């Protein structure tokens, strides 16, 4: 039995290529996107909510810690459950809310914090302080919120409660991040309606995640009318407690689908393809085409699946261009640059940037080669998990800082080992 925990603590893991198809059953963790949405909605709801199948990872624990600091009672009776008890109000925390590099928490909480009667400071680590929050802050400022960011990034400071006008309207440019839109929608459901949320541009990053938000809001009692492709009207005046089962994480599933495709194996995830409502689930249909992936893959609506697909593309029969991925530059790291750099580190010319596109040269002959490479993960869980797949085919792939996968998939390395992957 491999001591995976000890390997992770050492700060490097080398993945040994497999000699047979990977087969077995792995249950992906609960969806991070859904877990953090329903945690916030439960905190804004009156009563006791039960969230089952939830993800317990660094990102969701940072969200739950912040909500506790604002007076919400959250119990964790087991590894997959949150029990949230709230009177529907958030209180001023006694200290800045430290959110690490949890993007959903940092994007959702500034809007929710406008309901707090008192000052709120939201801060993060060095990586978070480089991630843009300006569009959301500016929208809230136009609505009368006393809020300030720091050169368009965290820390974010709110200095007083906001007496929102009845029937307020929020206008936001969602091109940079759909999370700004979701933040405003969830806030709107807590206000005395009707409240209109309107996009100022035609583009929106990963619109499918807005659909996740709307579904979660409905589960907690919100009534949302989609007026057109660019606006919604929310007519609820407060959330109610709910029972909510979180589906498995589709982004996490892409690594397992990718591992099966690379090794011609079959990994049972315990959930059917139609059991996912998350946008990244559409990556399954692309992965099923391997080793004949399309020449052009538009990653706009499955952004977190792009690192998985990019590593698969390295072994594809023909080169692949990834488009619609400019938003990947403002994730946990600049993922466009990171993917190009680390692919190029494996073999010069394997990956390169072309504007905001990523081009993967592709070479099936990489399989079986000895190409000692230390993959820099940039403290980004998705870079670490995606490039581990390269180690299933290439000898010498070492992942630095493997512990960063705890952000969304704490058991990733154990699950690979359980499938028979040798880690050193």
Image: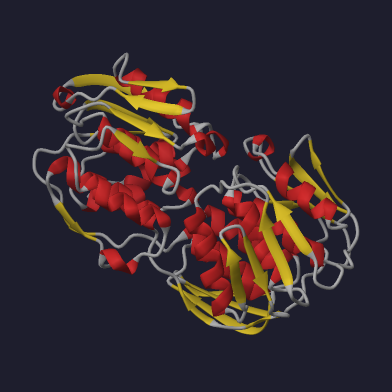
Q: Nearer the viewer, residue 232 or 368?
A: 232
Give percent across and percent down for residue 24: 17, 58
Considering every residue shown, the one lying at the far front of the view is 228
Give percent across and percent down for residue 74: 62, 73
| Residue 284 located left or right of residue 110 | left
Instruction: Please say if 191 is above or below 208.
Output: below
Give percent across and percent down for residue 387: 33, 34
Instruction: Please say if 344 is above or below 146.
Output: above
Instruction: Please say if 97 is above or below 148.
Output: below
Where on the picture, by quarter, is residue 359? top left
| Residue 413 located left or right of residue 19 | right
Considering every residue shown, the one lying at the far top of the view is 348
Q: Residue at x 68, y 49 (%)?
A: 200
Q: Residue at x 87, y 69 (%)?
A: 165
Q: Say how many tags the image has.
A: 0
| Residue 314 located left or right of residue 224 | left
Q: Nearer the viewer, residue 53 or 338?
A: 338
Where on the picture, by quarter, is residue 226? bottom right
Is residue 205 visible from the viewing direction of this image?
Answer: yes
Say which quadrant the C terminus sits in: top left
């Amino acid at each position: 039995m491999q001591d995976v925990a000890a390997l992770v603590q050492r700060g490097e893991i080398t993945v040994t290529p497999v000699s047979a198809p990977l087969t077995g059953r792995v249950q992906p963790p609960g969806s991070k996107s859904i877990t953090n949405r329903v945690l916030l909605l439960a905190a804004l709801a009156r009563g006791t909510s039960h969230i089952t199948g939830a993800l317990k990872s660094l990102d969701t624990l940072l969200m739950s810690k912040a909500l506790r600091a604002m007076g919400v009672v959250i119990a964790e009776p087991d590894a997959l459950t949150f029990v949230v008890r709230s009177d529907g109000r958030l209180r001023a925390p006694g200290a800045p809310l430290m959110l690490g590099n949890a993007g959903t928490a940092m994007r959702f909480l500034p809007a929710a914090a406008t309901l707090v009667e008192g000052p709120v400071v939201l801060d993060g680590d060095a990586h978070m302080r480089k991630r843009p929050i300006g569009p959301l802050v500016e929208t809230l400022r136009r609505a009368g919120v006393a809020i300030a960011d720091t050169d368009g990034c965290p820390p974010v400071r709110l200095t007083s409660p906001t007496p929102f006008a009845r029937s307020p309207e929020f206008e936001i440019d969602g091109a940079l991040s759909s999370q700004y839109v979701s933040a405003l929608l969830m806030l709107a459901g807590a206000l005395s309606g009707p409240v209109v949320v309107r996009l100022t541009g035609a583009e929106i990053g990963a619109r499918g995640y807005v659909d996740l938000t709307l579904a979660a809001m409905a589960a907690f009692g919100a009534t949302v009318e989609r007026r057109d492709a660019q606006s919604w009207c929310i007519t609820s005046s407060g959330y109610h407690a709910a029972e909510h089962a979180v589906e498995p994480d589709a982004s996490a599933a892409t690594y397992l689908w990718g591992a099966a495709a690379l090794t011609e194996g079959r990994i049972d995830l315990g959930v059917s393809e139609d059991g996912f409502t998350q946008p990244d689930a559409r990556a399954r249909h692309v992965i099923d085409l391997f080793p004949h992936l399309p020449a052009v893959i538009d990653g706009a609506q499955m952004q977190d699946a792009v690192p998985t697909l990019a590593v698969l593309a390295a072994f594809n029969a023909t080169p692949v261009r990834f488009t619609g991925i400019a938003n990947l530059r403002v994730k946990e790291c600049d993922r466009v640059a990171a993917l190009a750099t680390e692919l190029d580190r494996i073999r010069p010319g394997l990956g390169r940037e072309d504007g905001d596109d990523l081009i993967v040269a592709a070479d099936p002959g990489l399989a079986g080669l000895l190409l000692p490479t230390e993959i820099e993960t940039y403290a980004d869980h998705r870079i670490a998990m995606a490039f581990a797949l390269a180690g299933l085919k290439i000898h010498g792939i070492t992942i630095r800082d493997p512990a960063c996968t705890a952000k969304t998939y704490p058991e990733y390395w154990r699950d690979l080992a359980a499938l028979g992957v040798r880690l050193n």
